[in-house]
Image (spheres, rainbow, N blue to C red):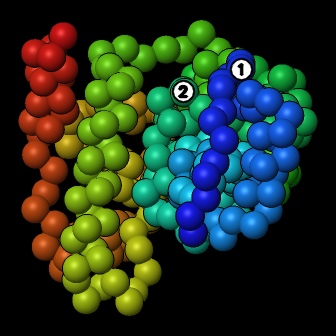
Amino acid sequence: MSCDHPWLSICGRDKWVLNSAPLAKTYDRCITSCEHAWLSTNHTEVCSNCGRENRILSLDSYNKWSAPLARTYDRKSRFSVKVEKLLGIHSGPPVHDDMWLLLKTCTLTTPDSIRKSIRHSKLNTKHYDCVRIFTDVFTEFRVAGYNTHDMKNYLEKCFAVVHRCWCRSQCVKESFFSYDFLLRYFLEQIASPLLVYLKPRTNKRRLRKYMNKLTVIQFPGVCKTYYQNFVTDRFQNV
């Protein structure tokens, strides 16, 4: 389409003002008769023929802090949440959860005493994976000797390797590993002090089952230098 458009002058940021009133009528006629060919600029659409521009408010399809409308189960995200709770960088249960009220009435000194109070409670939701958070809130017990950022990277990297091996194996049609088993297994390889926050093993049969599954999926094993490598690389980049 050919059109002798009147010249426009910019006034302000988003305002277009015509130089004269007669030209404004001509411009309006051109806009209404134009067969628009829209070009997208993410937040606006512009006609390549007449220059008309419309704002577009698009829905954010992905946000790290909010789940999209359609979301399937994500094993890596689920494990990452457990890691954050173990490292004390998670907010824990909602403030109105009955577990907070229960623990306020107990005498607590160590993670083990918190686990006993949780186990003897009659609440349906125990929140065993929040033992670290409860310990930081209700006791003076603390552990040292690790870097939170490096430990998080180490645990998530180890899980990613296990998950990749499992997806490539014949075991993908079977149930996945227990997250608690993998978390304890990774920490045991580097003798981490964070083991004190985890529930002790009680089922030897289940332990053999998961250890055999690691062999079946051809998991190469956790290199004990993974965590040290993270620390070394971090200081080299500083």
Q: Which residue is mark 2?
A: 88
The residue drawn where x is 90% and y is 36% is 96
Q: Amino acid at mark 1?
A: Cys
Residue 214 is situated, as x and y percent measured from the top left of the image, at: 22, 70
Q: Mark 1 — residue?
A: 11
* In the rendered image, the vertical position of residue 144 relative to residue 94, given as above or below: above
Residue 131 picture location, percent across and down: 60, 35
Q: Quadrant of the N terminus?
A: bottom right
Residue situated in front as seen by the camera: 4 or 79: 4
Is residue 126 visible from the viewing direction of this image? no
Any part of residue 173 in sight: yes
Residue 165 higher or lower than 62, as above or below:
below
Q: Nearer the viewer, mark 1 or mark 2?
A: 1
Would you say 215 lies left or right of 51 here? Answer: left
Across and down, in percent, residue 237 comes to: 15, 17
Q: Nearer the viewer, residue 121 or 12?
A: 12
- The residue lying at 38 percent from left, 49 percent from top is 183
Element assignment for label 2? loop
Between 98 and 47, which is closer to the camera in this rendering?
Answer: 47
Q: CA distance from mark 1 to mark 2?
A: 53 Å
Residue 69, percent from left and from top? 70, 64
Q: Residues within 10 Å of mark 2 (few under 14, many from 20)?
A: some
- 205 relative to 140 in the view: left or right: left
Q: Residues within 10 Å of mark 1 (few under 14, many from 20)?
A: few
Q: Pick whichever, 202 or 190, lies toward us.
A: 190
| Residue at (64, 65) in percent of width and height | 36
Looking at the image, do the residues carrying marks 1 and 2 touch, with CB atoms under 8 Å apart? Answer: no
The image quarter in which residue 225 lies: top left
